[in-house]
Image: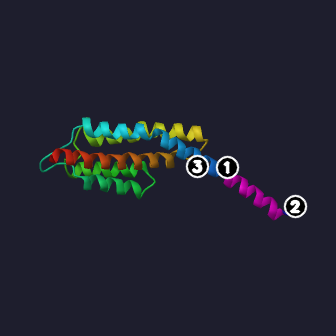
Amino acid sequence: MSEATGVMTVDRESENDRQKIELRVQKGIRQKEDDIVIAIEEALDKCEYPKSGRDKLESSQFRNLVRVADTTESAEVVKNFLRYQVGRERKWGRGKDSLAERIVQDIDGKLKTYAGEIAKEAKSADSKRIRMELIRRYLGYGSRRLRFLSLDQEG
């Protein structure tokens, strides 16, 4: 057996291991989707933020947050952008019962915990990447829910 063949076999095996891990990660994410949807729907249904009037949170503002999450690998960047938006206008609510604060709590709490559980179960060391995928899904489901709530309020 040549060295090249030996290296190629090792590369195939490690690639196979990476694929197995990724499949377990994706399975874990899918298994948490109900929890993620419920978390963001609860936040939108129960937290304080303007639901009508001039300061009403629009779908476009939520989509901007989704876009930020799509363009970064950092949960801190997402939270920073959200806090920047809170400082600019009241649309996300303010204070401990606000939608913005709940989103930050979910990112730092539930989503971080879920990512750790998924990483452990999948035997992956990449919980940061898993957490970002969960954040993206959470915010995406939130954008959908807000759109539904907006239509519901219009009558």
Horizontal side of 131 relative to 95 (left or right) equals right
Return the mark for residue 39: none
Which comes before the other along the chain, label 3 or label 1? 1
Q: Nearer the viewer, residue 16 or 61?
A: 16
Q: Are marks 2 and 1 in contact (CB under 8 Å)?
A: no
The quadrant of the image that shows the N terminus is bottom right
Residue 112 lies, in percent from the top left, at 45, 40
Q: Are marks 2 and 3 in contact (CB under 8 Å)?
A: no
Residue 14 lies, in percent from the top left, at 70, 53
Give the residue number, with chain letter if any, for mark 2: 1
Residue 137 lies, in percent from the top left, at 41, 48
Q: Amino acid at mark 3?
A: Glu
Residue 116 lies, in percent from the top left, at 52, 39
Toward the front, the furthest residue is 155
Give SS at disc 2: loop
Q: Is residue 4 magenta?
A: yes
Give the residue number, with chain letter if any, for mark 3: 22
Q: Amino acid at mark 2?
A: Met
Give the residue number, with chain letter if any, for mark 1: 17
Q: Amino acid at mark 1?
A: Asp
The magenta segment is 3-16
- The structure residue drawn at horizontal position 40% and vertical position 56%, both measured from the top left corner, is 70
Which comes before the other along the chain, label 2 or label 1? 2
